[in-house]
Every structure is written in C-alpha cells, then in structure tokens.
Image (cartoon, rainbow, N blue to C red):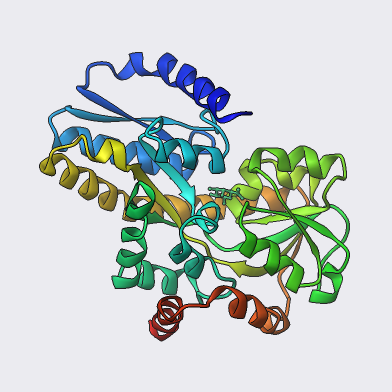
C-alpha cells in the first residue's frame, strides 16, 4: 500500500469508530495488533478509564485492537504523522528508527523479567522513553512482553545446531535478522499478521514469540514445536503522537503520563495470568515444548551481534548500566 492509501484506510476505520466515544471532548485513538482481551489491549483501556476519570471525561481513549489500523511498522509511521494518537507496540519495530531502543531489544540483555522491570522502571527506562521525542513520539510507559522463544513446524529444536537451515520470521528489525543469522538459521522480517499463513504454506518454518502471542495468534496450530531458549525479553511501549501531545495542556499531558504509568502494574498482573493461561492452552493442544535447553551457546553466539549494534559510547554505557542493575 502507498502511504496515501494506507492513511486513507486508517482514517476510514477511525471515522467509523469515533461515534461511540463522542461524549468526550477529545478521543485519543489507540492502535494495537493484538485481539480484544489481550493484556496490552486491556491495559490501554484501563489507562483510558484512568485518564477520563482524571480529566472529568475531557479526554477518552478508544482502542482499535486486532491490527484494525494496520501492522505495527505502518502504525508507527501513522502515529508520527498524527493520524493515530496512541500506539502500543513492541520495541522491536522501533529499532531501525530509534537507536536507543536497540539496547533493551538485544538478545539475552535481561537476565529475567524482574531484571527487565528493575531497568525499565529506573533511569535507563526514562532515558529510552525520552529518546522517542526526537522522532515525533512521546514515550509514555513500558509494558511486559514476556520472553520470546523459537517455534516451528518441522522438528524439535534441542540445541543451536538444530536451528541450521530453518527459516524464521522476525519482527521488522535488522537486529533480529542478525540475531537469527548468528544462531545459524535464516531470518525473514515480515508483519505479524502474515506469519500464520506463511507457516501454513511452508514459506517459513516458524517464528519466535512469547506464550500469549504464540497462543492468541493461533501460530501454535501450525507450529507444533516450541523451544524455550528465551533469547529475547523485549519490553513493549505505549507511545503518543507528538502532534497530539502538543495539542494538550500541561495538566492534560501530566494526566496522560500518570494514567499510562498507573496502567503498568495492572498490565503486569494481567500479563502473568495470561502467560499461565496461554501456556496451559498450548500444552493442552499437544504442542511439543522443549524446556531442557542449554542457553550458553546461544548467549555466546550473540557476541558479534553486540559488536555490530553496541557501537557508540552512549549505547555502550546503556549496556553497562543494564548489566550492572540487580
Ligand atoms: C508480540 C508483541 C507485538 C508484536 C508481535 C510480533 O509479542 O506484543 O507487539 O510485536 O509480538 O512479533 O510482531
């Protein structure tokens, strides 16, 4: 689609959706690739309720879930242009645009979800949120994205050697292409919405994601082997278009930030519950889950990836500070 056609399509969806929330002075339209009920979608709805309450119904949020406004890479662009007001996206699709976002997207940079929380809730997280502004976006809050692991339709992956020759979809980020290459497999960047049919038709052998996405996308129906190598713990982010932000009063801007921050602990609880429920569903469907995997060779294989992407003093400093965080 050309940008013009894409924007026109988005505007048509947005126009059809605004009636429901027309009591508000300003309805902020928010995009999410996930279906209704998914923790990220529910977190932004919660954020909207907080915001409406704080502003006496002046500001409302309407969430367009299920990629109604498009795939992540396109919706990011539309948020930069102010066609979409709010967007909940993985940090991955920002990697090629905002260099700071590459650091928390590095494979095995976080030792655990708790480590990720400690980093993203602190000064490093604030610095990364601040980096969005130079790209016409306002970073509001980070959400959980679990840990991502490989799944495929061909065979159980018990070691790095088993990855050789397999073709995996990755998010549209050069970093993830290099990550998969360094592991000895082949990478194809593609939008999330194309993954199911691409596995089904054999265009790719698999992809990588967390439990809730593996389950809610239905990918587990076409990829029967899931290996918990947990190569990525990529935070997700809620951003606002700077064009929309600039239209708000200082008080309303503060209310937006506060509502976004308030949604974080709520999201984390919903995430933990959904992870467990998704795992149960996937296991019940008979997917073979490989948990006993030595991650050391995977971690060692990432040295050239770090060398390629952690290039400036600023980025090196971010890595050092993340590694030094408890
Ligand atoms: C999910 C993430 C989405 C999207 C998707 C993907 O885990 O929540 O924002 O990035 O992965 O792989 O494209």
Using the image, determine if residue 165 lies above or below residue 65: below
| Image-based side of 9 in relation to 142, left or right | right
* Residue 27, visible in the rendered structure: yes
* Residue 228, visible in the rendered structure: no
- Quadrant position of the C terminus in the picture: bottom left
Where's residue 19, x and y in %?
34, 13
Q: Front-most of 246 and 12?
A: 246
Q: Front-most of 195 and 96?
A: 96
Q: Residue at x 53, y 60 (%)?
A: 146
Q: Residue at x 69, y 46 (%)?
A: 190
Q: Front-most of 275 and 194?
A: 194
- Quadrant position of the N terminus in the picture: top right
| Image-based side of 304 in relation to 28, left or right | right
Using the image, determine if residue 163 lies above or below residue 45: below
Using the image, determine if residue 202 lies above or below residue 209: above
Where's residue 82, x and y in %?
37, 34
| Image-based side of 105 in relation to 84, left or right | right
Specify the quadrant of the image occupied by residue 197.
Answer: top right
Where's residue 115, x and y in %?
43, 74
Specify the quadrant of the image occupied by residue 70.
Answer: top right
Q: Residue at x 72, y 61 (%)?
A: 150
Where's residue 118, x and y in %?
36, 72
Q: Residue at x 69, y 67 (%)?
A: 178
């Amino acid at each position: 689609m050309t940008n013009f056609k894409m924007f026109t399509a988005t505007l048509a969806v947005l126009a059809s959706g605004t009636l429901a929330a027309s009591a508000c002075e300003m309805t902020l339209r928010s995009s999410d690739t996930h279906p209704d009920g998914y923790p990220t979608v529910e977190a932004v709805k919660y954020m909207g309720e907080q915001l409406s309450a704080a502003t006496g119904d002046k500001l409302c949020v309407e969430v367009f879930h299920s990629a109604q406004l498009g795939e992540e890479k396109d919706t990011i662009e539309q948020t930069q242009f102010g066609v979409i007001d709010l967007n909940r996206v993985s940090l991955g699709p920002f990697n090629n645009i905002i260099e700071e976002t590459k650091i928390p997207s590095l494979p095995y940079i976080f030792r655990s979800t708790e480590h990720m929380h400690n980093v993203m809730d602190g000064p490093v997280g604030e610095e990364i949120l601040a980096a969005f502004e130079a790209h016409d976006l306002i970073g509001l809050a980070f959400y959980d994205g679990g840990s991502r692991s490989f799944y495929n339709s061909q065979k159980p992956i018990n070691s790095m050697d088993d990855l050789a020759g397999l073709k995996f979809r990755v998010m549209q980020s050069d970093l993830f292409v290099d990550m998969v290459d360094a592991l000895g497999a082949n990478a194809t960047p593609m939008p999330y919405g194309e993954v199911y049919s691409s596995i089904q038709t054999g265009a790719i052998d698999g992809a990588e994601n967390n439990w809730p996405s593996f389950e809610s996308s239905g990918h587990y129906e076409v990829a029967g082997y899931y290996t918990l190598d947990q190569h990525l713990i990529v935070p997700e982010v809620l951003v606002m278009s700077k064009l929309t932000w600039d239209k708000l009063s200082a008080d309303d801007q503060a209310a937006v930030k506060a509502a976004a921050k308030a949604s974080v602990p709520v999201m984390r609880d919903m995430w933990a519950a959904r992870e467990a429920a998704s795992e149960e569903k996937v296991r019940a469907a008979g997917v073979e889950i490989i948990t006993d995997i030595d991650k050391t060779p995977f971690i060692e294989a990432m040295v050239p990836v770090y060398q390629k992407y952690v290039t400036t003093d600023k980025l090196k400093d971010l890595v050092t500070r993340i590694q030094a965080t408890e």
